[in-house]
Amino acid sequence: MVALVASTIITILMSVAVVAYAKRRPVDPPLSWGEAMIFSSVIFSIMFLAWGIVPHQWLTLAENEWSFREDRIWTAWGALVPISQGGWFPFNITYRVLSDSVAALIYIISLGPMVALWRIWQTRETLNAPTTAVQTSTYGRPLVRKG
């Protein structure tokens, strides 16, 4: 349980750090080789945590500590009792299927923030843009008259 919570918190904190840095970093200066390596390592770490470590820790917790096995049938606290158990529900849902479904949800849910992080980084010039823009002509020159 501690490993699942810790890896989830680290993933969220690293993602928040990327957003905070995207708001500070100007768009114009090019990246150096070292900066590019650091940034790619951070992004790889976030992706590795979100799609590798967090689902693995969930499956480990569910299967080892909570005994989500193939032979246990999930009845949703008596609401979805399968026909094989004398109920009305047409098929069996095992605890193993339930834990795998939660792991798939972790993948799906973590895809949204990852795409949002990519969008924030690629559109950071709008985050850093000044609010008062100078009106320009069709040739790109400012229309401000110097007095």
Image (tube, rainbow, N blue to C red):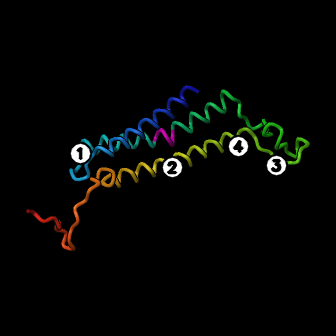
Residue 33 tag number = 1
Residue 35 colored in magenta in the image: no
Q: Residue furthest right?
A: 86
Q: CA distance from mark 3 to mark 4?
A: 12 Å
* Rendered location of residue 74, percent (x, y): 78, 39
Disc 3 to disc 1, how far (Cα)?
A: 56 Å
Determine whether, in the image, residue 94 is placed left or right of residue 11.
right
Per the image, the residue denoted by label 2 is 111
Nearer to us of marks 1 and 2 is 2
Residue type pointed to by label 1: Trp
Q: Earlier in the sequence, mark 3 or mark 4?
A: 3
Q: Which residue is mark 3?
A: 91
Q: Which region is colored magenta?
A: 48-52
User: How far apart, in angstroms, are the residues tagged by discs 4 and 1?
Assistant: 45 Å
Q: CA distance from mark 1 to mark 2?
A: 28 Å
Q: Residue furthest left?
A: 147
First reached walking from the N terminus: tag 4 or tag 1: 1
